Image: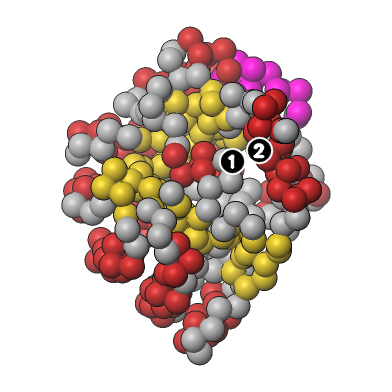
Amino acid sequence: MAGIYLHIPFCKQACHYCDFHFSTSQRGRDELLDAMLIELKMRATELQGQEVSTIYLGGGTPSLLSYDELMRLFEEMYNLFVVDARAEITIETNPDDLTKVYLKALKQSPINRLSVGVQSFREEDLKAMNRAHSKEQALSCIPNAADMGFNNISIDLIFGWPKLEMNDWMKNVEIAFSLPITHLSCYGLTVESKTALSWQIVKGLTMAPDEEKAAQQYEYLLSESERLGFPWYEISNFSKSGFESKHNRSYWQGIPYLGIGPSAHSYNGEVRSWNVKSNGAYVAALQRGEREYEDEVLSHKAKFHEFILTSLRMRKGICLVSLR
């Protein structure tokens, strides 16, 4: 059993809190997708003999890709790998991309799970975050996706935003659970260096997050999600029974996965590697028939520590027998 992660490093605009690798320029998009196809071929033997049970398109904003661009990637993966007929296949999306036309196209692809980056249902939060979508788009795209036949829909929310009061957070949670979703990912705001949000805080243009307020918002989420049948299964993730994210769970369980694209990470059970964090350098290397990356061979001690840390993130915790 193994997974494939594809990093699509393009966005319409830069969210003020984000420190993932992305570009707001679409220049070189065709060349980068060609390079990802080359990398898939180059590294196909790394999963030899393993059935692919999850595929995850992350970013960046994978929903910027057209149906034809997505299908180029899927056709190559299905040619190179043995993909389980029941594989979980996820695409991260932005609400403004999920028009009825685009949803209809996605339904014709192998994708069977949507992860929608809502972040907040408050217009003032979306503007402060520099999100590309509106509250109305967030509210309409999820019912539209369900009407189109998607029955596995996850959304992301952020708590601990500087001006997000408890009543505002309670309303966000209420709206989220009123929608036809099966999974919810909620992340406490982390101020990363070299982001616009970090600069705004340093310059006194916005407040720093209040940790006590964030903790109260998280505690409310825990109780409300449990009450509504979305118990937490990992610190930041909540779902209906049977709709836990198989792909993300594989990270926490140490299952091998292949990371394709600039900045994408891979793990084979012994070695962790990560591609160069530059679109240009990534493309140039693969055009030469090479892969530019770094790696780390994990010692037994390092793997043991990772097992402890990831297990403690999960609700099921650690079986003491497994530590022997």
Quadrant of res 272: bottom right
Image check: 138 left or right of 316? Answer: left
Q: Foreground residue, 297 or 119?
A: 297
Instruction: Write down the region rendered in magenta.
Output: 210-221
Residue 235 position (above or below residue 277) = above
| Residue 91, position as x, y percentages in the image | 38, 50
Report the residue marked by disc 2: 310
Identify which amino acid the numbered label 2 is placed on. Answer: Thr
| Residue 95, position as x, y percentages in the image | 38, 44
Report the residue marked by disc 1: 252
Quarter the C terminus occupies: top right
Image check: 235 left or right of 116? Answer: right
The secondary structure that dominates the magenta segment is helix
| Residue 114, position as x, y percentages in the image | 36, 42
Q: How is the image coloured?
A: secondary structure
Q: Foreground residue, 63 or 113?
A: 113
Which residue is pictured at 40% across the width and 48% down the height?
A: 54
Which residue is pictured at 55% across the width and 78% down the height?
A: 291
* Marks 1 and 2 close (CB-CB < 8 Å): yes
- Give the mark nearest the N terminus, 1 or 2: 1
